[in-house]
Image (cartoon, helix red, strand yellow):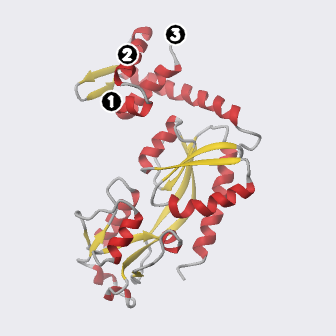
Amino acid sequence: MTTIRQLQYLVALADTGSFAEAARISHVSQPALSQQVKALEEKLGVRLLERSTTGAILTPIGRSIVSKARGILGEVLGIEELARSAATGLTGTLRMGTTPTLGPYLLSPIIADLHRAAPGLRLYVREGIPDEQALQVSRGELDVMLGPLPIRGDDLEIEPLFREPLDLVAAVDSPLTQGPVEPDALAGQVLLSLDTRHHLHRETQLIAEAHHMALSPDYEGTSLDSLHMMAASGLGLTVLPRLYLQSDVGGLSGLGVVDVSGWRAHRSVALAWRRGTSMEAAFRVIAEHVQRSARRMLDKGLG
């Protein structure tokens, strides 16, 4: 009999193309995963994968079966969600993913707001890379994720929430922070960013290209705080989200905002969950709280 676990392992292989990585995310040994997939092939009487030393590629019938398997696994998750959700779903523990460029300074006031509105709701928050978390939502490892657009996933419902300005900052004693500057004054300036896995790196790269700035390859930050500290030390300029600069977690200590004529940089933030989930009503309530809290904070300005 084909089992749910076998389908989960097959989908994990389809997502990763690697037995080792599929075993890791499935929390099982590689031989056990390989054995279960082989047993599935024998049961179905078809070859699902082309195996090689570098990984695994789905056969045409394998791709079709994976597509069906995703639907089956989604239904199983729906059954589990129904069992643990109340009328509105605002009870129990939700697993929320978020990026370290957003969660640490935005979620604290929002979680407090949600707790007042829904005392029975518990949020387990996990920080990670947005592209990886979108896959985790699709696989049911996370219930919902809060992150910058674009969020990719054919089986995801994506609810845009707000636009957050991205501010250019430098050490407080930099000449660039002393008054309005024209865009051509940025040419050649060193711009610091996070590593390439983060959406904020892509935004920073576009800004660097538009203003002929030099994106530093040698000093990539590991967090917004590390970018803050490096910029405050005079190592270069950087781009930081407005809500981070307004927060107690971040702030403007040692930094000044570079007031560039015509500056309009921003990013869009959204909430995403599996399409068709029985918890959609709960997620839309969460989306409203996040949207309202973020807009209230943005309305205050940098002060």
Label 2 or label 3, whichever lies nearer to me, is 2
Tell me the residue that label 2 is attached to.
Answer: 35
* Dot placed on the residue nearer the N-terminal end, 1 or 3: 3
Give x and y (percent) for residue 156.
54, 42
Secondary structure beneath dot 3 equals loop
Residue placed furthest toward the right: 87
The answer to which of 24 and 151 lies nearer the viewer is 24
Residue identifier under label 1: 20
Residue named by callout 3: 1
For image coordinates 59% across by 61% down, the residue present is 108
Taking 186 as reference, is 278 above or below it? Answer: above
As shown in the figure, which amino acid type bears the numbered disc 2? Gln
Distance of label 1 from label 3 (alpha carbons):
25 Å
Query: The disc labelled 3 sits on which kind of residue?
Result: Met
Badge 2: how crowded within 10 Å, few (<14), some, or many (20+)? few
Closest to the camera, between mark 1 and mark 3, is 1
- Which of marks 1 and 2 precedes in the sequence? 1
